[in-house]
Image: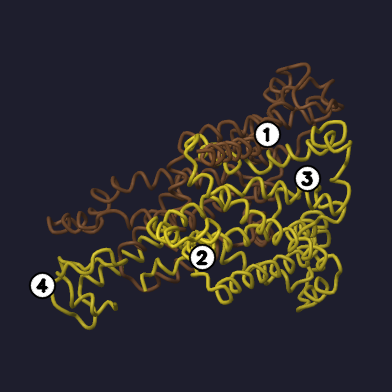
Chain colours: A yellow, B brown
Amino acid sequence: MTAKTAAVTTGEPGEPGEPGESGEPAAAGRGHRGQLSEGARAERRLGWLLCAPAVAVMIVVAAFPICYAVYLSLQRYDLRFPAESHFVGLSNYGDVLSSSYWWHALAVTLIITVISVAAEFVLGMLLALLMFRTIFLRATMRTIALIPYGIVTVAAAYGWQYAWTPDTGYLSALFGDSAPLTRTGTAIAVIILAEVWKTTPFMALLLMAGLSLVPEDLTKAARMDGASAWQRFTRVTLPLMKPAILVALLFRTLDAFRIFDNIYILTAGGNGTYSVSILGYDNLFRALNLGIGSAISILIFVCVAIIALMYIKVFGAAAPGTWSTGE
Amino acid sequence: MAATVRQKSGWITANIVTMLVMLIPVLWICSLSFKDPSTITDPTFFPKRWTWANYSGIFSTSDFTRPLLNSIGIGLIATFVSVLFASLAAYAVARLRFPGKSALVGMSLMIAMFPLISLATPLFNIERALGLFNTWIGLIVPYIAFGLPLGIYTLSAFFREIPWELEKAAKMDGATPFQAFVKVIAPLAAPGMVTTAILVFLFCWNEFLLAFTLTATIAARTAPAALAFFTGSSQFAVPTGSISAAAVVITIPIVIFVLFFQRRIVAGLTSGAVKG
């Protein structure tokens, strides 16, 4: 519905519940001035006015800095030799993309992302079903499930680190005084464990919201028709939950891809466990090379954009927010 | 009958196992924080000798108390401003018709998905140039920006649920759109705003990367970042006990908070998802 038709239909109750429906009854009698009624124009102005503070902050903190990062990434800019800064074109990108560190970090990040999101999805679905269906201690269950979500990531990560430290940790002692954080493979496994423990409840909550949208009648009907519990779940529940599942997976994938806190506390990126965010951090704040660091930052940003596009184009995830426009 | 008993015990087992998995890591941190420094290298789950020394240690220096204060102050200010700006924008998104709306929603979602490290560099450089590096403002402003997408997303979902006939009725009675917002919609929107404030505050309280890179001293460093700089109560002591105690201190209030506002948080987290 365009602003023009909105002006025409003012005074009508309109279709209830249609997003953005707010015909201006006050403006009904004033007629048209050009294409827009007075009311529609006032609505427009108010809309922009109300959004202005939010937009200003987001531009200052996100849009401008990301442009500045693009500019920095085209410079040779070493904080130790600030006088020697100069434009170098795309050579920082060349340096990063031809470095084995970048590809190692990308591989580590992708492994962590894929395994932890897959595990979170399966465990989150089980937890969602448990919270949704259980009668025993239902409220307690839902409350306790929020604890990992509420806990500060850094605090939880220290807990895992100490648990796996020989001579200190109960888990290390349990597994024969092992020191998993000192070897790449096992360290990544511990990082994934910490990540999965912390974020599975969040995934479960999103999935539970999807579960509650599945009409009880449909699963009942399927049961009447002799479908087993597994069939009811895969043929009825899952397809109906698809939009909720895709939104949950999209959120968690993008979140897992930028993993930093857990790795920084557990291994500080040592023993080959560095993710792309850790690599960017090391170049920026340890090597103080803003040029290379910015190039890495921009590449991470591009990766995130590609992942989001893939979800939306390939899997057909409703781009989050499309509902907001009401179109 | 046998099947139902088996089913029931199955559910109970599943519940208990799940609860243990959620609780044991938290109990472990608590237990570590009560371990006597001389027994910290004893890998039993529960302390053999209990002590408050770790707690009295961290509260005796400003290395922890100052960051704790920073966390509270920065979190509260950022949450307040963020929710205020977000509710204005969310009202516009949910109720008004204006060009550029989808651009606003798109932009805020892009920011929600931003890898924070991509912003750490430019913000580090900009804040050093402006003298905002290592100040409260230097963290508050980015936190407001990252609270906004969450706020706009959650609040516009809440605002949609409000019966908009009331707003219309107010306008019929001669209220301006702004009055309709302040007098009619705002009181109805209060629960949604509280929920959003909780989620934004949890984000600020939990944030590590920016707190770590945009601060240099305890003047502005928040508690999660301060943990990573702990050296123990004395120069030679292992910081394990102190870090665990500090981790418990920053965790327990949030856990209580989360449990208290459980329903609101669940509603807030899922409000956007079910509409997707």
Q: Is residue A53 visible?
A: no
What amino acid is labelled 1 in the image? Answer: Ile
The vertical placement of B228 against B61, above or below, is below
Pick the residue in front: B168 or A187: A187
* Mark 2 chain: A
Task: Tell me, for residue A266, which label it has, or none.
Answer: 3
Dot 2 surroundings within 10 Å: few (below 14), some, or many (20 or more)?
A: some
What amino acid is labelled 2 in the image? Answer: Arg
Q: CA distance from mark 2 to mark 4?
A: 54 Å
Q: Secondary structure at mark 4?
A: helix
**Image quadrant where one finds the N terminus of chain A:** bottom left
Name the residue beneath numbered marker 4: A29
**Left or right: residue A12 compared with residue B200:** left
Task: Tell me, for residue A128, which label it has, or none.
Answer: none
What amino acid is labelled 4 in the image? Answer: Gly
Dot 4 surroundings within 10 Å: few (below 14), some, or many (20 or more)?
A: few
Name the residue beneath numbered marker 1: B24
The x, y position of residue A322, in whole percent, is 44, 69
Number of the front mark, 2 or 1: 2
Q: CA distance from mark 1 to mark 3?
A: 18 Å
Pick the residue in front: A150 or B53: A150
* Mark 3 or mark 4, earlier in chain: 4
What amino acid is labelled 3 in the image? Answer: Leu
Number of the front mark, 2 or 4: 2
